[in-house]
Image (spheres, rainbow, N blue to C red):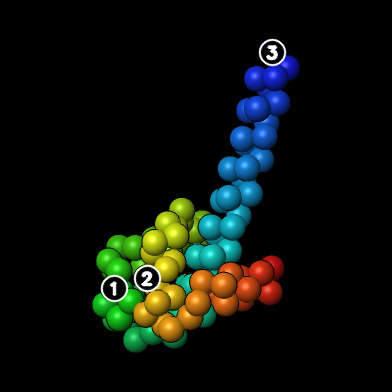
């Protein structure tokens, strides 16, 4: 029983940690890039992603953003993933 409780506790910690990282990533993209774009639609077209994804990223609570989407956005901006994650780390 203790083992199961420990596993559930560790999984909950991991989920909370993951949610905070996703929130930080979405907040960065939203405040630094989407807010400076002409519109959400223009940002979506320029970065080869769907407009509904841009709206999800812009939500207050964040969005469970896939790495593929982050890669597409960074590729369109000419930013390496390592540079992107360094910026996220600096902001925290």
Mark 1 residue crowding within 10 angstroms, few (<14) / some (14–19) / many (20+): some
Q: Are marks 2 and 1 in contact (CB under 8 Å)?
A: yes
The answer to whether 82 appears left or right of 54 in the picture is: right
Sequence-earlier tag: 3 or 2: 3
Element class at badge 3 = loop
User: Which residue is found at the position 59% from the left and 57% from the top?
Assistant: 21
Seen from the viewer's position, the closer of residues 69 and 19 is 69
Q: How far across and how far down the image is residue 61, in percent?
A: 51, 56
User: Is 40 in front, or is 64?
Assistant: 64
| Numbered tag placed on residue 1 in the rendering | 3
For label 2, the residue is 72
**How much space separates mark 2 and mark 1, taking CA atoms?**
7 Å
Position of the C terminus by quadrant: bottom right
Q: Is residue 61 left or right of residue 38?
A: right
Q: State the residue position of label 1.
A: 48
Q: Quadrant of residue 28?
A: bottom right
Up-down relation of residue 1 to residue 78 (above or below): above
Q: Looking at the image, is mark 2 or mark 1 earlier in the sequence?
A: 1
Q: Position of residue 18 (x, y in %)?
A: 58, 50
Q: Residue furthest right?
A: 2
**Secondary element at image label 2:** helix
Asked if marks 3 and 2 touch (Cβ < 8 Å), the reply is: no
Q: State which quarter of the image contains the N terminus.
A: top right
How many C-alpha atoms fall within 10 Å of the one at disc 2: few (<14), some, or many (≥20)? Answer: some
Relative height, residue 84 to residue 22 (above, below): below
């Amino acid at each position: 029983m203790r083992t199961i409780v420990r596993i559930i506790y560790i999984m909950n910690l991991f989920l909370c940690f993951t949610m905070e990282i996703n929130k930080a990533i979405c907040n960065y993209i939203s405040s630094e890039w989407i807010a400076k774009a002409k519109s959400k639609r223009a940002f979506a077209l320029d970065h080869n992603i769907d407009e509904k994804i841009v709206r999800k990223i812009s939500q207050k609570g964040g969005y469970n953003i896939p790495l593929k989407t982050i890669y597409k956005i960074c590729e369109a901006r000419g930013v390496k993933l390592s540079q992107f994650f360094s910026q996220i780390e600096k902001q925290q």
